[in-house]
């Protein structure tokens, strides 16, 4: 692996706490990533499968899924928890880690695919970052964006209960994590359209009506099991706009 020792860009929050998440929550995180990459993989296979760039990788699940499909993986500005795991486990000799500003087209060779999962809400300028990703794609390359959804059932419930003024409000805790915004599926589509890419597919992953703490309580007390978690993914197929995570797959037109 090649590492360039620099401080993480200030665009990102501190996600060291990910390593201390409960085992059941970590398991659900892995299921969400597995679900997303099950949806992404058919499009991975339409590329040359040489190089993929991952922007702001949050944890090892993402890296483990991506190395299955590409000869070279470039991690840009991974969160520290992910970086520590990648280094410790020596995931793949063709995984490269670099730190840079988000204007990718100024510094990097073209990629067959670019992936950003649960990171776009933490950039100062999401429009700039998506445009940069679009310009960094090879002709016919694919962009895969997934964000935690502002319009999810849980956030709608928070508004109904008076915990939030609106679904786009950033809570004090989220500000501490340096979160800059909340996006929904419409917002993702708009960013992609403005970048000049062609929308290929959209969807949602995991429709939750409880918080993570509530789901943990249900699981730990034996009130629900694995089938309950999988049913939340099934519901998400029918109601993507209400899911905890929404995603879009876009393509750079061939020239």
Image (spheres, grey):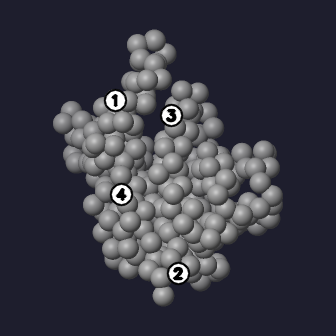
Question: Which structural element holds mark 3?
Answer: helix
Marks 1/2: CA–CA distance: 42 Å
For residue 28, the mark is 3
Q: Does residue 114 appear in the picture of this structure?
A: no
Name the spot of residue 78 as percent of width and height, x first: 63, 57
Q: Mark 1 points at which residue?
A: 210
Marks 3/2: CA–CA distance: 35 Å
Q: Does residue 141 appear in the picture of this structure?
A: yes
Q: Which residue is drawn at 30% across and 32% down?
A: 209
Q: Residue at x 47, y 51 (%)?
A: 39
Q: Name the residue under label 4.
A: 202
Total tally of numbered discs in the picture: 4
Q: Which of marks 4 and 3 is in front?
A: 4
Q: Which mark sits nearer the N-terminus, 4 or 3?
A: 3
For residue 139, the mark is 2
Marks 4/3: CA–CA distance: 21 Å
């Amino acid at each position: 692996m090649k590492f360039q020792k620099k401080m993480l860009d200030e665009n990102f929050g501190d996600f060291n706490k990910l390593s201390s998440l409960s085992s059941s929550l970590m398991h659900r995180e892995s299921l969400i990533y597995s679900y997303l990459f099950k949806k992404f993989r058919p499009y991975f296979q339409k590329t040359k499968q040489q190089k993929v760039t991952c922007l702001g990788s949050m944890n090892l699940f993402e890296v483990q899924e991506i190395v299955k499909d590409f000869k070279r993986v470039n991690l840009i500005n991974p969160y520290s928890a992910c970086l520590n795991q990648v280094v410790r486990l020596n995931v793949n000799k063709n995984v490269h880690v670099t730190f840079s500003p988000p204007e990718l087209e100024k510094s990097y060779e073209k990629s067959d695919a670019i992936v950003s999962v649960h990171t776009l809400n933490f950039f100062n300028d999401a429009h700039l970052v998506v445009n940069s990703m679009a310009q960094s794609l090879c002709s016919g390359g694919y962009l895969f964006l997934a964000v935690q959804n502002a319009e999810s059932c849980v956030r709608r419930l928070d508004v109904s209960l008076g915990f939030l003024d609106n679904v786009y409000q950033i809570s004090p805790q989220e500000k501490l994590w340096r979160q800059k915004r909340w996006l929904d599926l419409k917002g993702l589509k708009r960013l992609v359209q403005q970048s000049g890419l062609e929308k290929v597919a959209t969807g949602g992953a995991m429709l939750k009506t409880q918080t993570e703490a509530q789901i943990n309580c249900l699981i730990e007390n034996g009130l629900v099991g694995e089938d309950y978690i999988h049913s939340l993914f099934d519901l998400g197929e029918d109601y993507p706009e209400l899911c905890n995570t929404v995603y879009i797959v876009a393509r750079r037109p061939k020239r």
